[in-house]
């Protein structure tokens, strides 16, 4: 047989064609599960929330607001700590609800009460009812 290739070239071509399915199958068995695991891990990580949910934050705000309004604080330390916790909860609610630049975040000590009112109004404008619904009725 006359041909333009040598016998060695033909033999190498035959070996490559014969071995290719085995090599491809081996690579698929070794690399695909690891790649799938990495992809699945990345997908799960992207789905995880980065902080507390809106429901959790709003329930904290409502609980602290109710405690500030109804219970008398017997010590100055308790009152200051409760207001600081309420301010932090308001700022968390603004972050979760997407309220840009809440006034409470940059308020000085003497302006804190007014900034708290403005932040509460901004949350109400964003659709978050700070006072829980009365009589067990569902929030609109």
Image (cartoon, rainbow, N blue to C red):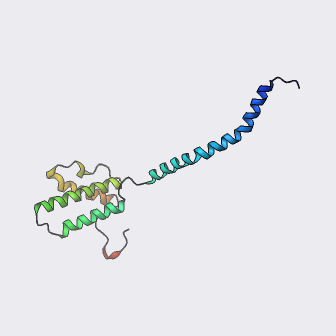
Left or right of 14 on screen, residue 133: left
Q: Quadrant of residue 136?
A: bottom left
User: Viewer-proximal residue, 67 or 98?
Assistant: 67
Residue at 45% in and 53% down = 47
Q: Position of residue 117 (x, y in %)?
A: 22, 58
Residue at 74% in and 38% down = 18
Q: Does residue 128 sit above or below 21 in this rendering?
A: below
User: Seen from this angle, which residue lies furthest right?
Assistant: 1
Residue at 19% in and 67% down = 69
Q: Does residue 15 sit above or below 134 in this rendering?
A: above
User: Viewer-proximal residue, 112 or 140?
Assistant: 112
User: Viewer-proximal residue, 138 or 35?
Assistant: 35
Pick the quarter of the image with the N terminus: top right
User: Viewer-proximal residue, 62 or 7?
Assistant: 7
Q: Does residue 30 sit above or below 113 in this rendering?
A: above
Q: Position of residue 114 (x, y in %)?
A: 19, 55
Pick the quarter of the image with the C terminus: bottom left
Q: Quadrant of residue 53?
A: bottom left
The total of numbered circles placed on residues is 0
Q: Position of residue 63 (x, y in %)?
A: 26, 66
User: Seen from this angle, which residue lies furthest left?
Assistant: 75
């Amino acid at each position: 047989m006359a041909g333009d290739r040598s016998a060695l070239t033909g033999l190498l071509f035959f070996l490559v064609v014969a071995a290719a399915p085995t090599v491809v199958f081996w690579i698929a068995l070794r690399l695909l599960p690891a790649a799938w695991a990495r992809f699945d891990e990345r997908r799960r990580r992207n789905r995880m929330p980065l902080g507390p949910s809106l429901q959790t934050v709003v329930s904290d705000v409502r609980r602290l607001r109710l405690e500030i309004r109804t219970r008398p604080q017997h010590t100055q330390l308790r009152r200051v700590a409760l207001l600081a916790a309420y301010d932090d909860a308001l700022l968390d609610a603004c972050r979760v609800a997407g309220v840009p630049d809440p006034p409470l975040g940059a308020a000085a000590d003497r302006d804190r009460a007014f900034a708290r009112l403005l932040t509460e109004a901004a949350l109400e404008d964003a659709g978050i009812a700070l006072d829980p619904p009365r009589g067990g009725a569902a929030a609109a």
